[in-house]
């Protein structure tokens, strides 16, 4: 690969990283790719990629600077949000192209300044791919950590065997319960699905258990979908370390051997505290020139701190600030929701671009600042407190009904 | 109206089969046009004003040992359409080594049929005869104009395609990023495949390709590009039997991506019209 090694050239960039073999990086990224968007932090020690969902699951992977043959950073930390799916597609673009198993893809990653795209230059067998990935502003991310002194239990398992156990658990079960028992010493997984209850007990003396520390018996409960992404990590890791604290925060660490270096993958899962859901009917106009309105039953789910409104067939969305919510009565729009991938954002979802553009026009007419979709996407709004206050309020189901009504009335006004 | 043909050479059978397989991956119905010297396989793009999407010509003498046809018009031609997947599955034993002869003939059973007769010989038992009847729709001479040889527009540039396997892998990855593929060729022998979506643009550069012809060879920088439906291009690349062929790639700026295989015994053209950005 043609790489300009000039130092003054590199100083113009916030981050420059080069790797001979991109495979290690892409396999680590794939393991945390349970959501589309990730936050990338670059420090002098390496790159950390953090992925969150519903404010209750956080996955991160740390790719140490030693994995890169060259690594230059011109700031203390550099952070940006990036579309992880596309990033992985780009990094693996040469996968399967070469018949020679020893050939590898080389990577040069550059990030010039805040707001600029991340550029990737990939090369294999004389073919070059260059990619430019748009970056987005970083939101506050959750600060999950379990300090050693507050750890109530800690176990280390062999990943390959633990994966077999975990992949066998009942997928129809909504929840998965983990029990760390002090006396007798064992680790138990309990599920209850359509087929009934099922529990797996791994005694501390088991061959697959390398370490078992438990100061007090604790049972913690998680959603099945919080646990499922662990499987991806186990495929590439050798050992799994599971820890919990008194609050039931679960931390799974996976040790991954990359050449002679060790990388770590980490998953934090917050215990299920509130979990409620309602079905509401939303009326949506499928496109601006279509007079038909369609009623879409949607599930409104509230898990711990985040409100998710889920509907099928929704593929276009734009982002709005909270004051636009007040304006919803003037809009004939799709679905109003909080977005689960971009916590703290209000989202309006549309089935097609024309109706989204239509909505933007309406917003403009109502003097709400909308410059363009790009701007809306990058606009930073933090609504966590508002959401918690709203959904914990006794009148929340009433609020849901109100949203439903407001949207419905609007549809018929037009 | 009469047609019968017999192929006995195992290589010819394989080649014939692989052409049928390519067509079956790209379209549902194929028109077979028979003349005294040539056999044409033609597919129209139904979603795009019946433009020809695949045009392939087989030289009768190189493929068939016996070839006998009588048409009903002066030009002595027969045209009929048939579901290509049925032909492909009937011929699937053509890749086996124990196939001795492959016979094709037009028959009048309950409806007009193309009858495929396969003579198989195995070590344990003696001869086996396997017959498939594929219903065909005979095309009347008044409709023949649709299946005329397409006028191929003047190409801005033609190059030899890089390894189809590599291109296939890359296009399949790109398919997951965006629906439109930009194919650009320039006189220095560079091919760029590009795709973009809201959050990214991705370009893959292949260099050092052999140039077959170029409109303006003095300006090496001048590139010619066409945007095509990535799914359709991927469909073409995914025809596994293409792997061994030398494929030419032609571009008419903004209008057409044209891939062709030109061998002595047969030619195959695949036309993919450009779409607006």
Image (cartoon, rainbow, N blue to C red):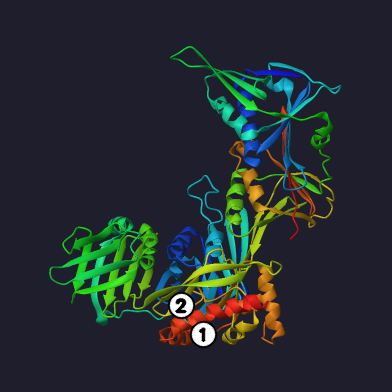
Looking at the rendered image, the quarter that the C terminus of chain B falls into is bottom right
Residue A167 locus on image (x, y percent)? 33, 57
Residue A285 left/right relative to B215: left
Q: Write down the quadrant of residue B92 in the picture.
A: top right
Q: Which residue is mark 1?
A: A382
Residue B171 locus on image (x, y percent)? 61, 52
Query: Which residue is located at x 69 percent, y 80 percent?
Result: A362
Residue A90 left/right relative to B39: left
**Numbered disc 2: what chain?**
A
Do marks 1 and 2 both belong to one polypeptide chain? Answer: yes
Q: Which residue is mark 2?
A: A307
Query: Which residue is located at x 81 percent, y 35 percent?
Result: B149
Q: Is residue A199 above or below residue B159?
A: below
Secondary structure beneath dot 1 equals loop
Residue B120 locus on image (x, y percent)? 53, 18
Residue A284 locus on image (x, y percent)? 60, 70
Q: Nearer the viewer, residue A92 or A242?
A: A242
Could you tell me if residue A113 is visible in this image? no
For disc 1, the neighbor class at 10 Å (few under 14, some 14 to 19, many from 20) is: some
Which dot, 1 or 2, sits closer to the camera? 2
Secondary structure beneath dot 2 equals strand
**Numbered disc 1: what chain?**
A
Q: Is residue A228 above or below residue A9?
A: above
Could you tell me if residue A309 is visible in this image? yes
Most extreme residue toward the left is A184
Q: Write down the quadrant of residue A2 in the picture.
A: bottom right
Query: Which residue is located at x 28 percent, y 75 percent?
Result: A244
Lower sequence index among marks 1 and 2: 2
For disc 2, the neighbor class at 10 Å (few under 14, some 14 to 19, many from 20) is: many
Most extreme residue toward the top is B126
Q: Nearer the viewer, residue A110 or B9?
A: B9
């Amino acid at each position: 690969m043609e790489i300009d090694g000039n130092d003054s050239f590199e100083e113009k960039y916030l981050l420059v990283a080069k790797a001979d073999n991109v495979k290690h990086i892409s396999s680590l990224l794939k393991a945390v790719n349970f959501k589309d968007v990730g936050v990338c932090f670059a420090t002098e020690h390496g790159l950390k990629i953090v992925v969150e969902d519903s404010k209750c699951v956080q996955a991160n992977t740390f790719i140490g600077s030693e994995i890169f043959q060259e690594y230059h950073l011109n700031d203390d930390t550099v952070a940006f949000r990036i579309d992880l799916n596309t990033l992985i597609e780009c990094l693996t673009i040469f996968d399967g192209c070469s018949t020679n198993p020893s050939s590898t893809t080389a990577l040069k990653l550059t990030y010039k300044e805040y707001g600029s795209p991340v550029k990737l230059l990939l090369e294999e067998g004389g073919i070059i791919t260059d990619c430019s990935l748009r970056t987005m502003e970083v939101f506050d991310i959750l600060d999950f950590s379990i300090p050693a002194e507050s750890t109530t239990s800690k176990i280390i398992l062999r990943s390959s065997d633990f994966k077999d156990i975990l992949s066998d658990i009942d997928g129809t079960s909504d929840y998965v319960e983990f029990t760390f028992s002090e006396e007798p010493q064992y680790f138990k997984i309990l599920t209850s699905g359509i087929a009934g209850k099922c529990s797996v007990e791994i005694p501390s003396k088991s061959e697959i258990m390398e370490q078992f520390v438990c100061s007090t018996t604790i049972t913690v409960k998680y959603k099945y979908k919080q646990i499922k992404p662990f499987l991806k990590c186990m495929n590439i890791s050798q050992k799994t370390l599971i820890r919990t604290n008194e609050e039931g925060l679960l931390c799974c660490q996976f040790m991954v051997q990359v050449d002679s270096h060790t990388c770590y993958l980490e998953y934090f899962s917050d215990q299920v505290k509130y979990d409620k859901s309602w079905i509401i009917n939303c009326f949506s106009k499928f496109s601006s020139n279509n007079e038909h309105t369609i009623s879409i039953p949607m599930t409104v789910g509230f898990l711990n701190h985040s409100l998710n409104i889920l509907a099928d067939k929704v593929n276009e969305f734009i982002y709005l600030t909270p004051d636009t919510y007040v304006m919803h009565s003037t809009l004939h729009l799709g679905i109003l929701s909080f977005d689960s991938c971009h916590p703290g954002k209000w989202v309006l979802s549309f089935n097609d671009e024309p109706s989204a553009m239509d909505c933007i026009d309406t917003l403009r007419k109502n003097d709400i600042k909308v410059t363009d979709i790009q701007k809306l996407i990058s606009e930073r709004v933090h609504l966590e407190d508002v959401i918690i206050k709203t959904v914990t309020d006794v009148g929340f189901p009433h609020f849901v009904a109100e949203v439903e009504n407001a949207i419905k009335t609007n549809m018929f006004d037009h | 109206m009469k047609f019968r043909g017999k192929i006995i050479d195992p290589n010819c059978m394989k080649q014939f089969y692989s052409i049928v397989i390519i067509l079956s991956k790209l379209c549902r119905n194929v028109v077979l046009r028979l003349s005294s010297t040539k056999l044409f396989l033609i597919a129209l793009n139904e979603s795009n004003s019946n433009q020809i999407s695949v045009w392939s010509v087989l030289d009768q003498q190189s493929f068939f040992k016996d070839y006998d046809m009588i048409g009903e018009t002066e030009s002595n031609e027969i045209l009929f359409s048939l579901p290509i997947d049925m032909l492909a599955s009937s011929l699937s034993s053509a890749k086996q080594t124990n196939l001795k002869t492959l016979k094709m003939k037009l028959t009048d059973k309950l409806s007009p049929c193309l009858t495929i007769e396969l003579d198989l010989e195995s070590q344990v038992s003696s001869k086996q005869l396997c017959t498939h009847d594929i219903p065909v729709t005979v095309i009347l001479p008044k409709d023949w104009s649709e299946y005329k040889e397409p006028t191929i527009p003047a190409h801005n540039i033609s190059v030899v395609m890089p390894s189809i396997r590599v291109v296939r892998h890359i296009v399949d990855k790109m398919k997951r990023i965006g629906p439109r593929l930009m194919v650009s060729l320039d006189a220095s022998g560079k091919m760029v495949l590009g795709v973009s979506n809201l959050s990214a643009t991705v370009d893959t550069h292949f260099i050092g390709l052999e140039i077959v012809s170029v409109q303006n060879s003095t300006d090496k920088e001048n590139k010619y590009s066409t945007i095509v439906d990535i799914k359709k291009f991927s469909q073409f690349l995914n025809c596994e039997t293409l792997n061994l062929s030398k494929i030419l790639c032609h571009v008419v700026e903004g209008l057409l991506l044209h891939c062709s295989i030109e061998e002595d015994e047969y030619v195959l053209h695949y036309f993919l019209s450009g779409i607006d950005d």
